[in-house]
Amino acid sequence: MTSPILMDRREGWTRITLNRPDRLNAFNEDMHTALADALDEAADDACRALLLTGSGRGFCAGQDLSDRVGGDEPRDLGATIEAFYNPLVRRLQALRKPVVCAVNGVAAGAGANIAFACDIVLAARSARFIQSFARIGLVPDSGGTFFLPRLIGEARARALMLTGEAVSAEKAEEWGMIWKVLDDEKLLPEAEAMTAQFATQPTQGLAFTKEALRSSSANDLDSQLDLERDLQRKAGRTPDYAEGVRAFMEKRPPNFTGRPE
Ligand code: T3D
């Protein structure tokens, strides 16, 4: 049987590929379970950066709707969110390393919002982002109502979520929904190069930066200043900070290890 998740371990980084191309990589339980296992493995310190992408012409079409037909009683969708989608978003957010998402094609429903849960989103020029929940009577999930208004503002997020209108990759870049749009053939090479580069960087410092950014939307300025102080204290004790300063003074490239101590 073909694995719904492909894991490709490289020197210091890992590529995870959603692999149900016939269904545009829509989620079923097997794919959720395999992805959770892959992310747990990628949480190891040996992996210093992660790339998430999809196989075939889509990135991810959200929930596999063929698993949602039939049955006498309505399914408890709250239970599937609790069991699968919420833990997935939490796993992605908790990774103490940069997570690059290469959106190789359409990203719909939970598929779009899972991309937004990653740190840096690159998209192929042919990709589209669709909050397709409205088209089938559901509520945007997987953190969409948290991430999207923060990325593109309330007015745009509200309209996209209420209409289910598709957004092109170019518009997504223009609106700040994603970091960069790339020609289709350049997407994977550039995403891999970026992830490989992250794997040579001061991993602990980047993890503290992620922590600070994650807290900034809930904190007031005073709390955020305090948090920056505390995180800077921790960053200042890492070997990579010492190496960064030494390398600067010696006018040579730094050799970061990513180690906490
Ligand atoms: O249920 C819960 O647990 C709650 C959680 C919900 C989370 C969610 O994500 S809800 C939202 C679910 N997703 C959708 O509603 C998106 C459905 N798909 C589409 O609207 C379209 O497929 C796309 C806009 C994404 C792409 O359109 P297009 O024209 O490029 O491709 P297509 O022809 O529609 O799809 C290609 C194939 O993939 C097709 O199969 P076929 O005809 O070639 O055998 C299509 O049925 C299949 N496919 C696409 N999306 C899904 C899917 N099959 C099952 N589930 C899908 N989500």
Image (cartoon, helix red, strand yellow):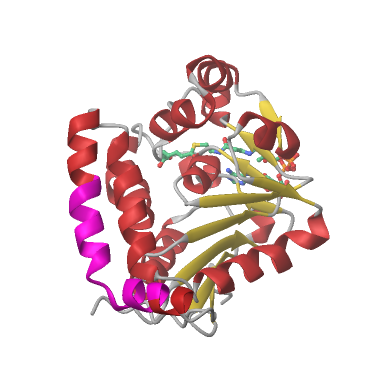
Q: Quadrant of residue 144?
A: top left
Q: Which image quadrant: the C terminus?
A: bottom left
- For the residue pair 182 and 205, the one nearer the viewer reads as 205
Q: Which image quadrant: the N terminus?
A: bottom right
Is 3 positioned to the left or the right of 256 in the image?
A: right
Is 202 positioned to the left or the right of 174 in the image?
A: left
244 lies above or below 170:
below
Whether residue 94 is visible, yes or no, is no
Image location (x, y in percent) of residue 77:
34, 37
Q: Quadrant of residue 54?
A: bottom right
Image location (x, y in percent) of residue 227:
20, 45
Residue segment shown in magenta: 228-245
Residue at x 24% of width, y 38% of height: 224
Image location (x, y in percent) of residue 174:
69, 32
Is 157 positioned to the left or the right of 237 in the image?
A: right
Image location (x, y in percent) of residue 154:
48, 18
Look at the image and say whether residue 183 sits in the magenta stretch: no
Residue at x 68% of width, y 29% of height: 166
Q: Quadrant of residue 146?
A: top left
- For the residue pair 15 and 30, the one nearer the viewer reads as 15
Residue at x 74% of width, y 55% of height: 57
Whether residue 179 is visible, yes or no, is yes
Per the picture, the main secondary structure of the magenta-coloured stretch is: helix
